[in-house]
Image (spheres, rainbow, N blue to C red):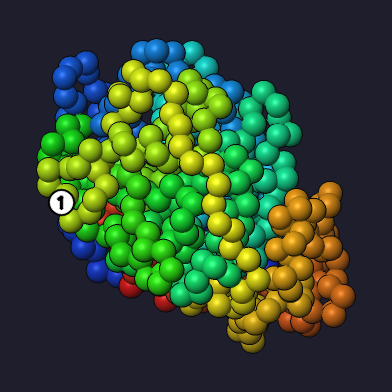
Amino acid sequence: MRGITGWGSAAAVLAAAGFALAAPPVQAATTAPRAATAPKVTVTGADYTFPATQAMVSDVAKSIRADVAYQQGFTGKGVGVALIDTGVVPVLGLTSGNVVNGPDLSVESQVPSLIHRDGYGHGTHMAGIIAGRDATDGTGFRGIAPDAKLTSIKVGSSNGAVDVSQMLAAIDWVVKHRNDDPANPIKILNLSYGTNSTLSRATNPLAFAVQTAWNAGIAVVVASGNSGTITVPATDITPIVVGSADPNGTTNPADDTLSDYTSTVSTDTQVKRGIDTLVPGRSIASLRDPGGYADTYYPTARVGDRYFKGSGTSQAAAVVSGALALILQKYPASTPWALRTVLRAASPQLPKATSVKSGELNLAPIFNASAPSGLSTVVQSTGTGSLQAARGSSLLYLGNTGTPLTGERDLFGPFSTTAWAKASAAQTSWNGGDWMGHPWTGTGWAAASDGQANWSGRAWSGTNWSGRAWSDISWSGRAWSGRAWSGTSFSGAAWSGVSWSGAAWK
């Protein structure tokens, strides 16, 4: 597959590589467009104010009292954070040495110019919130944990398309490689993703993957979703489930309210899961992905030349992942259970958000107390449930014929959740660049044993990648829980609602 030079727009790069993107969504703005404005520099004081149209990450840090951690010298140093998302781009703020790439498990991984690159903008936005920094001296843009080491694992393509099997492979990779860098072991996993699957956590393979990471000592942070109903894997008993609060133009939580898009109700009949903590998630201005899908189609979300504002439980989850890195630098022996316990205790009820039991995070008492403690075991899911049922309505479509990837199959052919669960638990699902016996990494995906896939020839079952193959048309449902860019929402959900398709932007 020929390489493409230069960054350009996601649509241009994909078209040149043989991909086709659907036309931009037609949608009426829910708010009047506002001109982009330069970020406001906050000043010292008991309370900070900022334009109601956007909250800089520095404002969010003050809202959750991360300033207390900074005053004690804690910035996330020595803590690894894994981000499974749409990749990152090397914009200022993500190039100062604390951001590295894990494997690219997306369908774009065989296009040299697209490897690891975020063609959408979601992963870049999350990375900036968690660990962005302009310089090591503390000046310029800073994420919540500017000295944490962030490992980006790309699974979502330039339109956000991803199959649940790619998520399983990505989580397995994080568990397998969590201690590869002893100076920055991966202790936190950010999943701003979810599906509307109704498969019970008792057998759900995605729940099993999250539990395996949790039991390996990785605090898994998940967005609750933006569609009203808490999405999988946020329905599971293990992860730290995050909802979004509206800061309403100040960093004083007294006037904060629950974001209207935050999912608060779980449909799992076995475990009635709720939100563990709330943090600001409305109109958060983080790093922009110039020419990316969201940047191209939502220009009113730009804030000056460098930033881009987005709303959703995705953004809120990223804030909490950064906050956990601060806590783990001070209390490195803390278990995931202990971290969830202390976050709940440090989240007092919001005066204007009485509809949920959880409150908004306040880090101050955590940094003025003893090391957190909590439970350490969980009843494991079997992980042997149907892969198709785990997808919910989020289907990836293949080839010009628009054939959906359905049934008990991954991108390479037949898939056994029973065999996978056994290998995942033993941490043997990954063997070098192969996952479950197939070459998910490297420069050429070999043909599957049943002849269904042949990446090196740009073919999928005899049809090439042009036309509708991997285009926006082909991503059904709603998923990746960022809800809106500049007031224009992705059908009420996205990265943790249930998907990002041309159909899902209404």
Which is nearer the eye, 303 or 159? 159
Q: How many marks?
A: 1
Q: Alpha-carbon neighbours of circle 1 within 10 Å: few (<14), some, or many (≥20)?
A: few
**Residue closer to the observer: 207 or 297:** 207
Q: Position of residue 415 (x, y in %)?
A: 74, 74
Of the residues shown, which amino acid type is indicated by label 1? Thr
> Can residue 212 be spotted in the picture?
yes
**Quarter occupied by residue 216:** top right
Task: Point out the residue furthest to the bottom here.
Answer: 401
Whether residue 300 can be seen here:
no
In the rendered view, would you say 62 is above or below 409? above
Q: Residue at x 50, y 71 (%)?
A: 200
- At horizontal 34% and vertical 18% (from top left) the residue drawn is 368
The quadrant of the rendering that contains the N terminus is: bottom right
Say if 381 sits above or below 284 in the image: below
Query: What is the quadrant of residue 24 in the picture?
Result: bottom left
Q: Position of residue 39 (x, y in %)?
A: 29, 32
Q: Quadrant of the C terminus?
A: bottom left
- Residue drawn where x is 30% and y is 34% of the image: 346
Q: Say whether residue 132 is left or right of residue 278.
A: right
Image x and y of residue 301, in percent: 32, 49
Q: Which residue is at 59% across, 23% downward?
A: 78
Q: Nearer the viewer, residue 92 or 211?
A: 211
SS for tag 1? loop
Q: Give the percent coordinates (x, y) of residue 430.
A: 78, 53
**In the image, is residue 241 above or below residue 11?**
above
What residue does disc 1 label?
354
